[in-house]
Image (cartoon, rainbow, N blue to C red):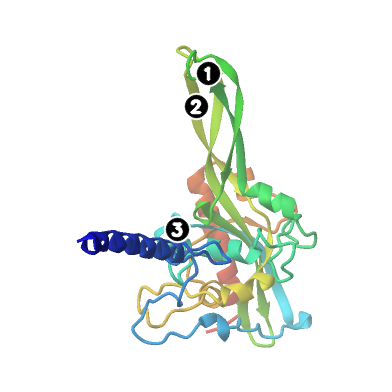
Amino acid sequence: MKKLALIPVFLLIAAVSFAQIDEEEGAEEYSDGSTLEQPTQPVRPAVEHSWEQEDIGDFATQVPYVHQRQADVMYYITIWRRIDLREKMNHHLYFPQEKRGTWRSLGQVILDAVDLENAENNQDALPFYTDEFCNIPQSLEQTKAALVERRTIPKYDPETFELIGEEEIVEQHAAKEISYYDIKELWFFDKERSVLEVRILEVAPKIEYEKVLNTGPQEGDEEAVGGVKQTRTLGHIYYDELRPYLAQQEVFNVRNNAQRPSFDDVLTWKREFSSYIYAEQNVYNDRWISDYILNARDQRIESDKITDKIRSFEHELWEF
């Protein structure tokens, strides 16, 4: 009888021992901090097709320009235009707002190429420049500061609701807040090939965010907060340095998703985007259309006039 009474005790001890072993094995941590139950590293590339998908980054390179002799350029004009991502035709440049599988927006491609976290040790990181001529590199601190919004809010005692100081809030801007791209273009006529061509010289991403205005405590110890839309330029990018990164990212094709172009195809060659001209090269050097035309409707009319002037130059060279 004593032996039979000890059997349940041995079974209970064995069950507890195995449970502890399983718990210790399940809690085993890897070098990256992940556990067996919750791995953080991907086990395979993003699954998006039922067939084997080749990585576009392994073989994609930008299509080189045709060699251009300066002696063959009989006419050229420099213009500045703006791509507004709020327009429906430009949604393929703006979406997805967050990275999904292999899909990235144009803004996310640029921020990934800049690689702010490892830019100091990454020799291939895309540099920003201080102006449109792209000859003076922008410091890493300036680039990081452009992507951060700092503001202070009053801090109150939770019991007496008395003002006891201020608290600083740091907000990090993301790629989805890039709402515009200002691009500088060169339109020229090559008399050797008898063609009018365009080349993008530089790109300036601009973020739009709501700046919070703190006016101090009001009646009832409530904070009066107002929002004002602000636009900030992250920096200037030399387009030829950006093209290798654009060539490695596919873009959603509305017509046929099996024939997906790259961002380099869309921007450089197909020019599948909607934009408007806000300045042309002039004797005043830096005068925009908005400086001498105040009405928004008339500004767009002036923008269309500049576009027609470029097209008319090519047409007037021929006789029919």
From the viewer's side, name the closer residue of 135 and 221: 221
Between the residue at mark 2 and the residue at mark 3, the CA separation in whole angstroms equals: 27 Å
Q: Secondary structure at mark 3?
A: loop
Drawn side of residue 286 relative to residue 56, left or right:
right
Drawn side of residue 232 relative to residue 10, left or right:
right
Front position among marks 3 and 1: 1
Determine which of the numbered discs, if any, sits on residue 225 in the image: 2
Between the residue at mark 2 and the residue at mark 1, the CA separation in whole angstroms equals: 19 Å
Q: Earlier in the sequence, mark 2 or mark 1?
A: 1
Residue 282 rendering spot, x and y as whole percentages: 71, 56
Residue 89, compared with residue 257, is above or below; it is above
Residue 258 figure quarter: bottom left
Q: Amino acid at mark 3?
A: Gln
Determine which of the numbered discs, if any, sits on residue 97 in the image: 3
Q: Amino acid at mark 1?
A: Asp
Q: Secondary structure at mark 1?
A: loop
Q: Where, quadrant-wise, is the N terminus in this rendering?
A: bottom left
Q: Residue furthest front?
A: 1
